[in-house]
Each structure stands twice: as structure tokens, then as C-alpha cells.
Image: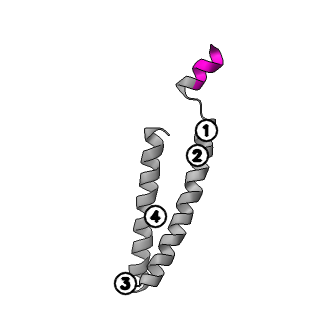
Amino acid sequence: MSARGIKRRIFAAVILILCATGSVFFWNRGSFDLFEFSFNLGVAGVGFLVLHHRWKAKEARELTPGKVEDIFS
């Protein structure tokens, strides 16, 4: 996995966690609900896994310098 892929995954995880946390406070008018928070984290986790596997498949198809060297050597 490249540095770009790692940064992409970290950014996505942070955004998903912030949205999961923010939506709990938004819908409960500033109060915290542990059940709703855990549900939102579960949904965010599933979303992250979907993104991870989608990006992983896309990165496997991309040409890297090593693959290009193997093809044209």
C-alpha cells in the first residue's frame, strides 16, 4: 500500500468517526446517547470496510514502477 493509500484511509476514518460523533449530538440536541453512538460507529465501520476493499481492488490494478518494469523488460 502506498503512502497515498494510507493517507486516504486515515482521512476517511477520521471523517467517518467525526460524522458518527457529530450526528449523535445533532439529533439529540447536544446530549450524548451511547446506544446511538455505538450504532453510528458500527455503520461507519462498515462504510470504512467497503471503501477499503474498493480502494484495495483499484490499487491492485494500478501500474506501479515495478509492474511497468516487468511489463517492458
Badge 4 vs badge 3, beta-carbon distance below 8 Å: no
Query: Which picture quadrant has residue 27?
Result: bottom left
Magenta-highlighted residues: 67-73
Q: Residues within 10 Å of mark 4 (few under 14, many from 20)?
A: some
* Residue type indicated by callout 1: Ala
* Residue type indicated by callout 2: Lys
Residue furthest out toward the top: 73
Residue designated by label 4: 16
Instruction: Estimate the spatial distance between the alpha carbons at disc 3 and disc 1, rounded to whole Å.
Output: 41 Å
Say what secondary structure mark 1 lies in: helix
Query: What residue is drawn where x is 40% and y is 67%?
Result: 18
Say what secondary structure mark 4 lies in: helix
What main secondary structure does the magenta stretch of the protein show?
Answer: helix
Badge 1 vs badge 2, beta-carbon distance below 8 Å: yes
Instruction: Estimate the spatial distance between the alpha carbons at disc 2 and disc 4, rounded to whole Å.
Output: 18 Å
Ranked by sequence position, the earlier of labels 4 and 3 is 4
Query: What residue is drawn where x is 53% and y is 24%?
Result: 65
Please name the colour scheme applied to the rendered image: one colour
Please state which of residues 26 and 50 is positioned toward the viewer in this rendering: 50
Height in image: 14 above or below 34?
Answer: above
Q: Residues within 10 Å of mark 3 (few under 14, many from 20)?
A: some
Height in image: 26 above or below 1?
Answer: below
Please state which of residues 63 and 42 is positioned toward the viewer in this rendering: 42
